[in-house]
Image: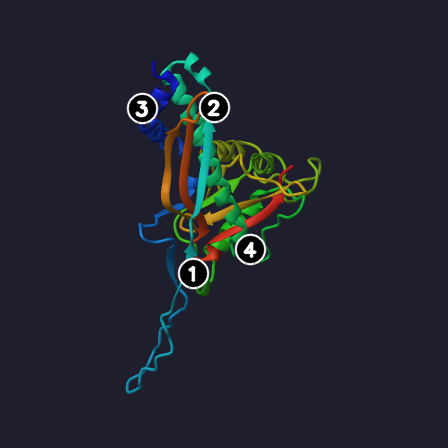
Amino acid sequence: MADTLTANVAESVVEIVDATIELIPHKAVMPSLAVKKTIPKGHDRIEIPRVNTTSTVQTPTEGDEIVVTSQFDLTSTTIQPTHRVIMVRIHERATYFSKEDTIALISEEMAQTEAQDMDLDLLAEFANFGLSESLTGFAGGTTVDLTYADLRAARRGLLSNTRANGGPAPGRIYGVLGPAQEEDLFENLGALGVGGVTAANAVQAIPSGISQEIIMQYAIPNNAVAGISLFRDGYMTEDANGDSRIGVFSEKALYLAIAKDWDMKTFEVPNWVGPILRATADYNSGVGAYPNWGLGGLVNGL
């Protein structure tokens, strides 16, 4: 009699892959915030072009010749995919559970692993953003908690970006925080402002009363603060000082270039009791647009 588990998994591979791909956006936030680009077959990388010069408007008077002083130059960002592999062994004891439960558990686990890998790749790109913390007034740093003023300064910096660096950041502005930074921000909004150091002498960022109730009801449930759509990322890492690098960026700043999306195959080997799943993909991330369309700010993560 055929191995029930192997047969069930093998015949359900397409179903598992579909379920896994569908679950990825629910397992990590960053893949949904990046611009997805498909690398066509026959190419091993993607080139994302951008204008590298600025043109000027001239105002010639009657009889003057037009002197061409502007030049249209293009540059590009190259993103080359990296091959990814996941190998999972499923013990035959999984036959103790129903086929539906087994497929659901496999899809859930694979989706979380795949989503986390994409997420960590994109989080690492925050270090490649070009907008300066010091120029914007972003007051983060080692062991310094995130405040409302930091987000406000980051947004102002993005919207007043110079023309030579791409101009004002277009589209929606996203902010990605870790759970610790989210907690610090909400504490700042509801209790402590930038006016002091302790609860006893600090000025509230939002005056108490009806204004505070309205703003807090809007900001926290709807995840919108200072015109920035906020997202929590539980995979955000901390450095040796316990600090994390958060990101505030345009919706057109980050790219996820995919040569091959996640697929899955099953195998059997004599030295393992049960089927083996192998999932492979080929992708990579990058700051595809102007670096100054994003700010990667270092703040306290404890």
Q: Residue drawn at (48%, 25%), measured in percent from left and top?
A: 271
What is the x, y in percent for residue 242? 66, 40
Q: Amino acid at mark 4?
A: Thr
- The kind of secondary structure element at disc 2 is loop
Is residue 89 at all visible to an observer of this figure?
Answer: yes
Q: Amino acid at mark 2?
A: Trp
State which mark lies toward you, 3 or 4.
3
What is the x, y in percent for residue 135? 57, 58
State which mark lies toward you, 2 or 3.
2
Residue of label 3: 11
Is residue 226 at all visible to an observer of this figure?
Answer: no
Q: Earlier in the sequence, mark 4 or mark 1?
A: 4
The image quarter containing residue 260 is top left
Q: Earlier in the sequence, mark 3 or mark 4?
A: 3
State which mark lies toward you, 4 or 2.
2
Q: Amino acid at mark 3?
A: Glu
Marks 1 and 2 sit apart, C-alpha to C-alpha, by 56 Å
- Report the disc number at residue 136: 4
Residue of label 2: 272
In this picture, is 144 found above or below 56? above
In this picture, is 36 found above or below 69? above
- The kind of secondary structure element at disc 1 is loop
Q: Residues within 10 Å of mark 3 (few under 14, many from 20)?
A: few
State which mark lies toward you, 4 or 1.
1
Marks 2 and 3 sit apart, C-alpha to C-alpha, by 19 Å
Residue of label 1: 166
